[in-house]
Image (cartoon, rainbow, N blue to C red):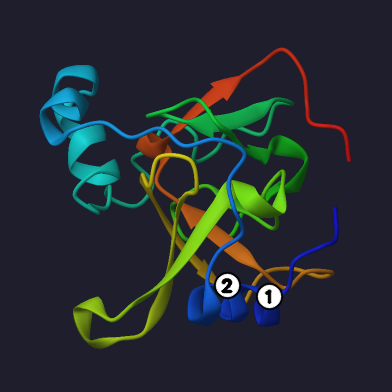
Amino acid sequence: MKMLNWNDVIRFANHGNPTPDRRVEKTDEEWKSLLTYEQYRITRRKGTEAPFSGEHCSIYEPGLYTCTCCETELFDSGVKFNSGTGWPSFTQPVKENAIKYEKDGSFGMVRVEVMCNTCDAHLGHVFPDGPAPSGLRYCINSVSLQKKEETTHEK
């Protein structure tokens, strides 16, 4: 996979996202029945967990992070880093089409929201202040992620 950079993120947010490998669509009632209150609030209603509160914030063991809602593989622990922000941070998704990007003008600022491209679950935001070589910081809510311990994604 080509390493994504900020120009790629802006291009996706402005001109459309890559096509996902599959789609998962459920009604609001179906999501409510499948998710905890906090999972639903964050992934389906674009909430945010308190900084430093999430279970994945300070864990760096090998594994893959999947979407809480649909189990799509999103991030590999090999690109996770300590951003000091209080949320799990990654430099790249496992695949270019794993993440969906949209402009977010809430709270009086312009940011780029990141969502699961399979089921549209809100994950967090991406910023252009991450480490080299990509310069990206995917700032993700822990509750949006599940960790698979078995293996890491092939790079």
Q: Measured from the top left, where is residue 114 in percent x and y?
A: 46, 59
Q: Does residue 152 sit above or below 136 in this rendering?
A: above
Quadrant of residue 77 within the rendered picture? top right
Report how many numbered discs are placed on residues in the image: 2
Question: Left of 49 or right of it: where is 130?
Answer: right
Which amino acid type is shown beneath numbered disc 1? Asp
CA neighbours of label 1 inside 10 A, class few (<14), some (14 to 19), many (20+): few
Residue 8 — which label? 1
Quadrant of residue 143 within the rendered picture? top left
Quadrant of residue 112 within the rendered picture? bottom left
Q: Measured from the top left, where is residue 110 in percent x and y?
A: 36, 85
Q: Measured from the top left, where is residue 62 in percent x and y?
A: 74, 26
Q: Nearer the viewer, residue 65 or 54?
A: 65
Residue that sits furthest to the right in the current view = 155
Residue at image mark 2: 12
Query: Are the two marked residues, 2 and 1, in contact with CB atoms closer than 8 angstroms?
Result: yes
